[in-house]
Image (spheres, rainbow, N blue to C red):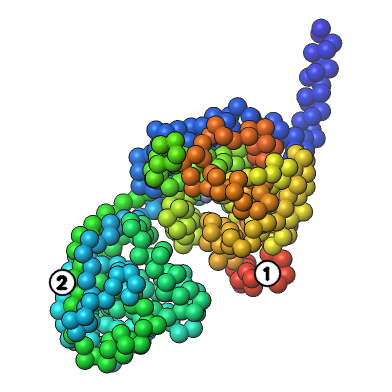
Amino acid sequence: MKVSVLIFLMMISIDLLAQTDAELVNQTVDQHMIKGQIHFLCLDALKGRDTGSPGLELAADFIEAQIKQFGVKPAPGMDSYRQAVPFTKTKPATTSVLSLDGVELNNPDDFFILDADNVFIESNELVFVDFGLAEDYKDIDVKGKIVIANAGDGESSDPQSWYYLSKEKNKLASQAGATAVLELYLNPKAPYNFVKRFLASSESMTLGHLEKGQTVVPHLMIDASKDKTVEALKSGKTSLTINIDGIQKEELFSDNIVGYVEGTDPALKHEVVVYSAHYDHVGIGQADMAGDTIYNGARDNAVGTTTVLVSAENIAKHPTRRSALFVLFTAEEKGLLGSKWFVDHSPIPLADIVYCFNSDNGGYNDTSLASIIGLERTTAQSMIEEACAAYGLKAIEDPAKEQGLFDRSDNVNFAAKGIPAPTFSMGFTSFDAEIQKYYHQAGDHAQSLDYDYLFKFFRAYALSARLIGNADEAPFWIDGDKYTELGKALYNR
Ligand SMILES: [Zn+2]
């Protein structure tokens, strides 16, 4: 008896001397714990974790308590685990009339409201201001007038940048004393009929609160493929009526959860690896066949949240050479908003963030795989493949490129700053019926997951994280990637 105890103790101490990353992963990743985390995040009491809801707040409390218990600390420069993100929630207009010389245009076929407060305007004072950017206001007086501008900036055709520009244009017009902005929208890359479906939607959530004293002037997007309308507006000889009513706005905060573990290598610990996932989902929606209205979001993205928690516990107990930042984003489902705010207000300088290893999930249809969106785009590929293989999984690149998944999750906000950022997802070979059965459906329940598979999946993520955090050199974009030059500029390479 005594002898066997002694041998056992000796084995442990030998083990401690030469523990591999895989052994360290196996020590902390616990199958029951994983199941508990996912089940909690998917409780009906959390009502589908909609941004701004008490249910998401419960999820945030849970995540915060978990990482705190693991020994994860607040990030340098932060006094808590919470990064408050400001949002404005807007209920759409019940009345929206735009008429030109007494002829009403149709919402949303001819125009839609990008932003507005309730307002009634009758005016024949229209001024064309080119793109409506700062330099366009130099020599003209728009006080009390309606401003007509071309959408975009004449250079980029990226619809997302047009959208951010519109916010800027509204501020400029408002400051110059204009009463409304009408943007003439024409973009072959994203035609009017395409964007109207997203932007003229029912309820919307946008980043930011109004600054003190700032007002929003009504901002309408006009389909500029209709020549007659454009001519009339640009001529300045039109009388215009704008009547908007029923809009309700609410300003609120929702939190990104952020935690930090300092690295162990004096030469590498200033380099930070971000491990991230969004923890929000879409809330309550249309009932499915079973009458279920709560969209619990097990796959999307209780699973991703758990990958980060699993790594947070592992790295808190066994820190890597590089420092680790764990970030759980709010409002991904509202348009990647929590991560957008994060990269624009990061507690760590972006040039110190060498990698972002994101996890987001729609579903899975092959339990022999992990599907990594962007696997082949960074030099971490071999590490991720090795980590997956250690648990009997094959790592494959995005099998459904037509879905544009790289650009549809939080990783892209890091990539857009130059930071290499793939997304680790459960195994799927195509975006087929099996995926769609659960993707953004009420039936995406915790009970419908294969936990034997997930056990391998989470360990594969945690081991990938360790290999990246401990590698002699930080991974980077491969040569020729869309983001390589941006990355070189960010890191001065
Ligand atoms: Zn997601």
Q: Position of residue 57 (x, y in %)?
A: 39, 40
Q: Which residue is mark 2?
A: 120
Q: Residue at 23% across / 57% down in the picture?
A: 248
389 or 182: nearer the viewer:
182
Q: Position of residue 121 (x, y in %)?
A: 16, 75
Q: Residue at 28% across / 86% down in the picture?
A: 233
* Figure check: 152 above or below 481: below
- Label 2, label 1: how many angstroms apart (C-alpha)? 50 Å
Secondary structure beneath label 1? loop
Q: Which label is found at residue 481?
A: 1
Contact between marks 2 and 1 (CB within 8 A): the answer is: no
97 or 288: nearer the viewer:
288
Residue at mark 2: C-beta within 8 A of ligand 1: no
Circle 2: is it few (<14), some (14-19), or many (20+) Cα within 10 Å? few
As drawn, the residue found furthest toward the front would be: 289
Q: Position of residue 349 (x, y in %)?
A: 53, 60
Residue at mark 1: C-beta within 8 A of ligand 1: no
**Quarter of the image where the C terminus is located:** bottom right
Image-quadrant location for residue 448:
top right
Residue 128 in view of the camera: no
Residue 399 in view of the camera: yes
* Figure check: 477 above or below 264: below
Q: Position of residue 433 (x, y in %)?
A: 59, 48
Amino acid type at circle 2 is Phe
* Figure check: 55 above or below 378: above
Say whether disc 2 or disc 1 marks the residue closer to the N-terminus. Answer: 2
114 or 100: nearer the viewer:
100
* Figure check: 132 above or below 41: below
Image-quadrant location for residue 115:
bottom left
Image-based side of 242 in relation to 227, left or right: left
Amino acid type at circle 1 is Asp
Secondary structure beneath label 2? strand
